[in-house]
């Protein structure tokens, strides 16, 4: 809960108001107890007239109103603190995500779940537990002082029994925290599964798997419900323990004042009754704290997940020193680099040592699954090497200011994402500055999209993406190439589509590569003969290792595997 308490400390003024509200609330409780006792004493024992007790009736009504009012104020202040705390946690997390090097990205589903659900889970700490903790501390202290002033033995009973309550709360609470942390990670897994299924809904439908997957999602949600019930079971146990301790405490006070009043005549009726009315109020405070504590512990489990995410990038980015990059095409060096995907045990790339000079173009070829796209991901800094390094202009990737490096890099993947935005926005998102109409038109010409755009209902303002106009594979590829062109990159990482390029896209690709190669360092995963023929150097990748490096003609003469690879591609 330390992390949540530190977050709550940011809201000093709300804390101050909660403190003042507690003083008012505690005074109202004592006033209410006093007036009730006074009324009973005066009416039943002293038999005074109605007029004489009227001021006490008014005081009682006043105390009740203040009590209700301060509960309302406590609720409002708690909600305000929860709202502000959640906002602050979310913006802190978004800022961290923004700053986190691409190496340390998480899956979208679990990130969304932390950002939305886990942050929401912290709410009860701020709107219930924290205000209740302030209220219980203040009110219990005032009641204790008043009871001690009236009857020391009753005060001692309260003082001795009270610590059992936090003790029971701590024992049960530690179980709650563990269980609710498990609950949050279960929710994250559930979110990943759900996100994945929603994305692949059409495929599931086409393969008639929708129903079966619905059952799987249903099963996962039932598991989640079972976990929730386990947490609730601990909550019921918590309430039961607190009830028991309170009852024993109140019973002890009742026996003590009863004996001293009736048998030993050591107390007046007024004192005995006053103490007896205050004792339940004392324990009620702890009971309320107990149930709020349970919610608070639930929040603490979620907070650990958030804290992990907020702290983890800081630790992993120790070497992230944000060096600037010069405004020129970089050289790219792989130094004994190994790379593996987090979900797989074995390395996909093994001991890659390769140097690409600035403004040179390298084509990477190899059989399917040899690790060509993985090499591009490592070069783009999306996949962290498990050993060795990738140097950008001689500097390790994670020592460079990422935003500057990415500004210089264009990474064209085989399956580019088209956003729900206009054609123009989808293309110009690649550029750092505004793209002039003339430049935009030139880029459209270059990637052979001019005629296509002309035919669209709203020309370049036509919306594309999810729920809007669909695109062919070739059109998608050409939009991705246009994105790279408007960016005027210094490093181009291009994953050529393996097969099925239409003639128009093929020529757009060829020209784009020529244009980009003029001022940039280019690494292409090549499938086409023209790309390897024009590359300054070709790298053959087999089973994650570089097995041959040289110019195309040289490799065709010297390397049998290379010949085999290209004998089938002749003429493409
Ligand atoms: N996210 C991932 N998690 C685990 N393994 C992966 C992941 N992505 C790719 N792989 C595995 O890494 C290996 C290399 O994949 P990669 O995509 O780099 O091959 P490739 O040479 O580009 O293949 P292709 O020419 O067919 O595109 C493959 O065995 C693939 O199954």
Image (tube, helix red, strand yellow):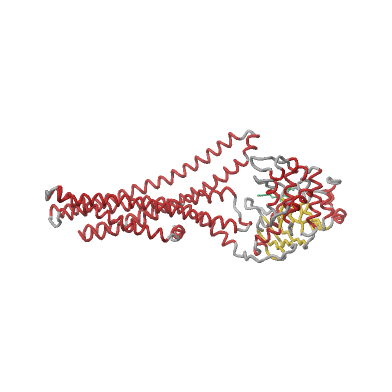
Image quadrant of residue 135? bottom left
Residue drawn at the location 56% of the way across and 36% of the way down: 214
Reply above or below: 466 against 172: above
Left or right, residue 531 beside residue 46: right
Query: Looking at the image, which is closer to me, 419 or 456?
Result: 456
Query: Looking at the image, which is closer to me, 14 or 297?
Result: 14
Query: Looking at the image, which is closer to me, 62 or 346?
Result: 62
How many marks do you count on the picture?
Answer: 0
Residue drawn at the location 76% of the way across and 61% of the way down: 354
Left or right, residue 423 beside residue 306: right
Residue 282 at x, y percent in the picture: 28, 54
Res 138 visible: yes
Left or right, residue 323 beside residue 257: right
Image quadrant of residue 385? bottom right
Residue 489 at x, y percent in the picture: 73, 57
Residue drawn at the location 28% of the way across and 59% of the way down: 142
Residue 566 at x, y percent in the picture: 83, 48
Q: Quadrant of the N terminus?
A: bottom left
Res 371 visible: no
Residue 163 at x, y percent in the picture: 32, 57
């Amino acid at each position: 809960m330390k992390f949540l308490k530190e977050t709550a400390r940011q809201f000093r003024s709300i804390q101050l108001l909660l403190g003042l509200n507690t003083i008012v609330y505690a005074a109202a409780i004592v006033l209410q107890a006093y007036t009730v006792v006074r009324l009973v004493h005066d009416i039943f024992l002293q038999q005074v007239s109605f007029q004489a007790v009227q001021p006490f009736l008014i005081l009682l009504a006043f105390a009740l109103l203040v009590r209700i009012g301060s509960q309302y104020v406590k609720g409002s202040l708690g909600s305000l603190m929860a709202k502000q705390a959640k906002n602050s946690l979310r913006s802190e997390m978004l800022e961290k995500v923004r700053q986190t090097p691409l190496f340390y990205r998480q899956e979208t589903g679990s990130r969304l779940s932390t950002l939305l659900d886990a942050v929401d889970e912290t709410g009860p700490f701020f709107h219930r537990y924290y205000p209740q903790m302030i209220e219980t501390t203040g009110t219990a202290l005032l009641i204790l002082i008043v009871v001690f002033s009236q009857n020391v033995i009753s005060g001692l009973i309260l003082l001795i029994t009270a610590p059992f309550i936090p003790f029971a709360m701590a024992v049960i609470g530690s179980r709650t925290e563990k269980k609710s942390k498990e609950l949050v990670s279960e929710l994250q897994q559930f979110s990943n599964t759900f996100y994945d299924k929603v994305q692949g809904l059409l495929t599931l439908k086409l393969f008639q798997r929708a129903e079966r997957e619905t059952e799987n999602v249903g099963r996962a949600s039932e598991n989640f419900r079972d976990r929730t019930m386990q947490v609730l079971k601990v909550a019921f146990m918590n309430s039961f323990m607190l009830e028991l301790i309170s009852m024993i405490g109140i019973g002890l006070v009742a026996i003590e004042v009863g004996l001293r009043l009736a048998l030993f005549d050591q107390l007046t009726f007024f004192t005995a009754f006053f103490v007896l009315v205050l004792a339940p109020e004392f324990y009620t405070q702890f009971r309320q704290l107990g149930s709020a504590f349970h919610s608070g512990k639930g929040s603490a489990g979620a907070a650990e997940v958030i804290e992990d995410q907020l702290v983890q990038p800081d630790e992993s980015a120790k070497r992230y020193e944000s060096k600037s990059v010069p405004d020129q095409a970089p050289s790219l060096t792989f130094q004994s680099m190994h790379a593996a995907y987090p979900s797989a045990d074995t390395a996909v790339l093994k001991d890659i040592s390769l140097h690409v000079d600035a403004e040179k173009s390298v084509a990477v070829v190899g059989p399917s699954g040899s690790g060509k796209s993985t090499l591009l991901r490592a070069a783009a800094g999306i996949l962290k090497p498990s050993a060795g390094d990738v140097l950008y202009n001689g500097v390790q990737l994670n020592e460079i200011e990422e935003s500057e490096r990415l500004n210089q890099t264009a990474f064209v993947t085989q399956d580019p994402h088209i956003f729900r935005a206009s054609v123009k926005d989808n293309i110009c998102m690649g550029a750092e500055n505004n793209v002039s109409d003339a430049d935009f038109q030139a880029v459209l010409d270059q990637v052979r999209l001019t005629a296509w755009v002309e035919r669209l209902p709203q020309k370049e303002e036509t919306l594309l993406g999810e729920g809007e106009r669909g695109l062919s594979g070739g059109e998608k590829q050409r939009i991705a190439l246009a994105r790279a062109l408007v960016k005027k990159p210094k490093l181009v990482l291009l994953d050529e589509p393996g097969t099925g390029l239409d003639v128009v896209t093929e020529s757009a690709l060829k020209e784009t590569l020529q244009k980009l190669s003029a001022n940039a360092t280019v690494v292409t995963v090549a499938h086409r003969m023209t790309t390897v023929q024009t590359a300054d150097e070709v790298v053959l990748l087999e089973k994650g290792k570089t097995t041959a490096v040289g110019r195309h003609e040289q490799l065709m003469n010297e390397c049998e595997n290379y010949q085999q690879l290209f004998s089938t591609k002749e003429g493409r």
